[in-house]
C-alpha cells in the first residue's frame, strides 16, 4: 500500500499553526542568490560552512519563523583553533553572506579610565548592534578580553563579565544580534561566558588536500622550476597554518628573486654592464631553504591544552598521518 501523502498542505496533513506557505522571501533570496564562493578557499572552511550556516542563517530576522525556530535564541558561537587558521576571515565571510552588519568588540573598543566606563561602552556596542536590521557582534581574540590576559583587576573583570551576560539576556527576540567569539586560547575564556557559547566549532589546521588548494592559489602566476611539485610541498608542510603557508611561499619567492638580483649586483661590482633583473624562477631548493626559516609555531604545551579543550567540547581532531 502506498504511504499517505502528509506533506504540508496536503489533505489530512498535520500542518503547524502559522506555518508559512513558503520560506520568507528575504531569506529565500539569500539562499538562492548567494553562492558559497566565499567559502571555497579550503576544505576546512567548506566543512564548517556546512556545519554552521544552517544554524547561523536562522539568525537573520524572519517574520515567518514558526515552531522551535520561532522560539529559539539567536546563535552564540565560539570559533576556536590555532592562530592563522582563518577564523577572523571566516566571520567576515559569514557577515557578508548573511548581509549582516559586523560590530567588532575588542579591549580597545571598550577601554576606559572612568569607573564603570567599560561596562557602559559594552552596553553601547550591544545597543548599536540591536539598532541594525541584522547584525553580528564579533569578539575577536576573546581570551584577551574575557580571560586572565585582560590584565583587569578582579572586580573590574567580574563587572565586565556580568555586564556582558546581562546584555545577552536583555535583548528581545526580534533584534537580538548573533554573537561570535574567536579565540586561539579558548581554555582561558571565563567559564561563565563560555557556558553561554553553546555552539562551538573547531577550526582545524588545513590537511594535505587543503594545503594543495591553498598552495595552488598562492603560486598562481609564479614562475616555477621544473622540479616543483605542489603535492610534495603539501606533504612536507604538515602542521602549517594558512598564514604560515602564505609566509612560506613569500619567503621562497624572495629567495628566488635574490639569485638574479645578486647576479646583477655582482656584475656591476665587476664593472660589467647588464640590463634589467632577469625573471626569477622559484625552485624546490628555494622552498627547502624557506622551510628552514618558516616553521609551525605551536608549542607542545599549547597543543596539549587545545587537544584537551577539543575533547571537552566534543571535537576530537584526528592527527594527520605522516
Image (cartoon, helix red, strand yellow):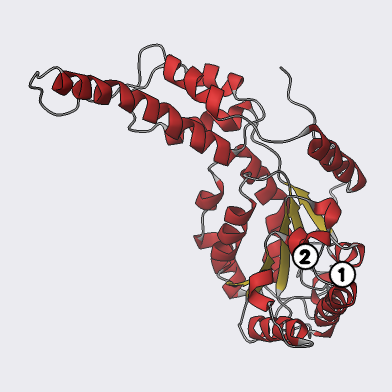
**309 to 240, vertically: above or below:** below
Residue at figure coordinates x 68%, y 77% from the top left: 111
**Residue 150 — which label?**
2
Closer to the camera in the image, 62 or 176: 176
222 displayed left or right of 191: left
Are dots 2 and 1 in contact, CB under 8 Å? no
Q: Which is closer to the viewer, label 2 or label 1?
A: 2
Quarter of the figure with the C terminus: top right
**206 to 191, vertically: above or below:** above
Q: Residues within 10 Å of mark 1 (few under 14, many from 20)?
A: few
Residue at figure coordinates x 71%, y 83% from the top left: 113
Q: CA distance from mark 2 to mark 1?
A: 53 Å
Label 1 sits on residue: 14
**Residue 154 — which label?**
none
Q: Residues within 10 Å of mark 2 (few under 14, many from 20)?
A: few
| Place of residue 52 in the rendered image (x, y in percent of width and height, measured from the top left) | 72, 55
**301 to 8, vertically: above or below:** above
Closer to the camera in the image, 101 or 12: 101
| Place of residue 222 in the rendered image (x, y in percent of width and height, measured from the top left) | 34, 29
Residue at figure coordinates x 77%, y 59% from the top left: 143
Amino acid at each position: 500500500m502506498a504511504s499517505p501523502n502528509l506533506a504540508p498542505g496536503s489533505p489530512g496533513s498535520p500542518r503547524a499553526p502559522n506555518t508559512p506557505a513558503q520560506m520568507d522571501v528575504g531569506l529565500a533570496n539569500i539562499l538562492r542568490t548567494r553562492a558559497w564562493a566565499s567559502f571555497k578557499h579550503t576544505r576546512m572552511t567548506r566543512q564548517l560552512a556546512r556545519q554552521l550556516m544552517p544554524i547561523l542563517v536562522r539568525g537573520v530576522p524572519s517574520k515567518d519563523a514558526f515552531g522551535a525556530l520561532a522560539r529559539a535564541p539567536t546563535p552564540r558561537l565560539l570559533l576556536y583553533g590555532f592562530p592563522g587558521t582563518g577564523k577572523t576571515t571566516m566571520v567576515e565571510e559569514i557577515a557578508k553572506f548573511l548581509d549582516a552588519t559586523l560590530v567588532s568588540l575588542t579591549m580597545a573598543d571598550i577601554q576606559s579610565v572612568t569607573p564603570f566606563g567599560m561596562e557602559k561602552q559594552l552596553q553601547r556596542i550591544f545597543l548599536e548592534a540591536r539598532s541594525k536590521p541584522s547584525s553580528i557582534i564579533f569578539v575577536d581574540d576573546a581570551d584577551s578580553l574575557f580571560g586572565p590576559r585582560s590584565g583587569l583587576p578582579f572586580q573590574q573583570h567580574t563587572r565586565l563579565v556580568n555586564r556582558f551576560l546581562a546584555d545577552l539576556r536583555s535583548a528581545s527576540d526580534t533584534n537580538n544580534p548573533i554573537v561570535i567569539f574567536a579565540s586561539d586560547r579558548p581554555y582561558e575564556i571565563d567559564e561563565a561566558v563560555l557556558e553561554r557559547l553553546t555552539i562551538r566549532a573547531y577550526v582545524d589546521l588545513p590537511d594535505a588536500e587543503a594545503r594543495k588548494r591553498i598552495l595552488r592559489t598562492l603560486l598562481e602566476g609564479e614562475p616555477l622550476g621544473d622540479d616543483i611539485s605542489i603535492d610534495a610541498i603539501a606533504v612536507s608542510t604538515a602542521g602549517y597554518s594558512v598564514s604560515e603557508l602564505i609566509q612560506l611561499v613569500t619567503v621562497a619567492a624572495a629567495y628566488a628573486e635574490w639569485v638574479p638580483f645578486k647576479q646583477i649586483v655582482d656584475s656591476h661590482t665587476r664593472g660589467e654592464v647588464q640590463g634589467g633583473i632577469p625573471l626569477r624562477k622559484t625552485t624546490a631548493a628555494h622552498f627547502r631553504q624557506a622551510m628552514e626559516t618558516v616553521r609551525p609555531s605551536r608549542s607542545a604545551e599549547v597543543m596539549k591544552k587545545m587537544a584537551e579543550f577539543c575533547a571537552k567540547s566534543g571535537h576530537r581532531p584526528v592527527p594527520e598521518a605522516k
